[in-house]
Every structure is written in structure tokens, then in C-alpha cells.
Amino acid sequence: MEYFEDRIFRPSDLSNTGLPRGEYDHCQFLGIGSGLEQLSGLRFAGCTFTDCNLTAANVVKTAFQDVSFEGCKMLGIRFDQCDAMLLELSFKNCQLNMSHFYKLKLKNTSFIQCNLSETDFTEADLTGSIFDGTDLNRAHFERSVLEKADFRTAFNYAIDPENNRIRKAHFSLEGLPGLLGKYGISVS
């Protein structure tokens, strides 16, 4: 496997086969629209992906350590299949619809201005995570740890307080319907 450090990758840097198999430390990936479909087994540490399309990328056994994504399209990614060791991610202005974070430890993860429609957070540990201005329409939370998570500016969520751990989580008054929906209570 090759080793890349402090490199900037643009669309013209990718061959028809995509990214070379290897380890990427403190690299930047800018505006890559294709070629990121096969990330299986790669290692990313301290990397940034900006305005990239990673839709349906294969991330089986991929290591993401302190990796940030900004303005990326990431539909249907199975993050639950990546290497969970030292997993640390942050997202800003990303489309993560239909992605899976099943059983992952995602403490203090930032989801800023993201679309997480139909995303699966079943049994995920999201302690202290931030969902700032994030759309959680039909996102699935079941037996999830949401303690100290911040949902004050999130919207369209439905979280069952009896089926998730929400101690010391932060919600706005406007978000009450998302917590009380199963009870058929109307809040106006």
C-alpha cells in the first residue's frame, strides 16, 4: 500500500481506477465527483473532503480518524461497515440521506447544516453530538445513546424518549412534537 501525506487531490489526480490503495495522512480531497466509490480498506487520518461525491462508496474496513466532510454528497454510505477503531468524523453541509451508523460510537460528532433523512442511528452512541440546523426527517433512533446531544436547531426528528437514552440532551420548544409524536399529543 502506498503512503500519502499532506497532498491535495483534485479530479484530475484520479485515474480511472479511483484512489490508489493506501494510507492518507492530512490530505485534502477537493471537488471530486467520481472515483471515490471504492474506499474499502483505505486509511484516512486528519483528512478533509470538500465538495466531493461519495455516494454509495464502499467503506468496508475503511479507517476514518479525525476526518471532516464539507459540502459532500454521501448518500447510502454504510459507515457501520468501516473500521470502528479510533473513528472520528465531522460533517458540514453534507447530504447523508439513507446512510447507516448502526452501533457506532460517534461521541461529540458534529452534523452541521446536514440532511440526514432516513439515516439509521440504531444503537449508535451519539453522546455530546451536535445536530445544528440538520434535517432528521425519518431518521431512525432506536436504543441510541443521545445523552448531552444538542438537537436545539435540528428539525423533522422523531425520537422516542422511552426507547433512547436522552439524559441531559438539549431540545428546543419547537422540537417537542418530535419527542411526543408517539403519544398523539398536539403541541401548538
Image (spheres, rainbow, N blue to C red):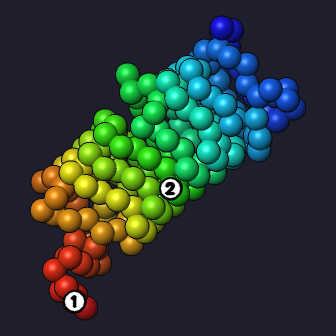
Q: Which residue is mark 1?
A: 186
Q: From the viewer's perspective, is 176 left or right of 76?
A: left
Residue at point 68%, 9% (across, down): 2
Q: Which residue is mark 2?
A: 98
- In this picture, is 105 found above or below 100? above
Q: From the viewer's perspective, is 72 left or right of 126?
A: right
Residues marked 1 and 2 touching at CB (< 8 Å): no
Residue at point 59%, 26% (across, down): 40
Q: Nearer the viewer, residue 14 or 5?
A: 14
**Mark 1 neighbour class, 10 Å CA radius: few under 14, some 14 to 19, many 20 or more:** few
**Mark 2 neighbour class, 10 Å CA radius: few under 14, some 14 to 19, many 20 or more:** many
Q: Please, what is the three-letter code of the amino acid marked with disc 2?
A: Met
Q: From the viewer's perspective, is 28 left or right of 84?
A: right
Picture quadrant of residue 134: bottom left
- In this picture, is 23 found above or below 75? above
Residue 103 coordinates in the image, percent (x, y)? 31, 40
Q: Nearer the viewer, residue 8 or 55?
A: 55
> Can the viewer see residue 52 in this picture?
yes
Q: Please, what is the three-letter code of the amino acid marked with disc 1?
A: Ser
Residue at point 43%, 68% (across, down): 137
Residue 162 coordinates in the image, percent (x, y)? 12, 62
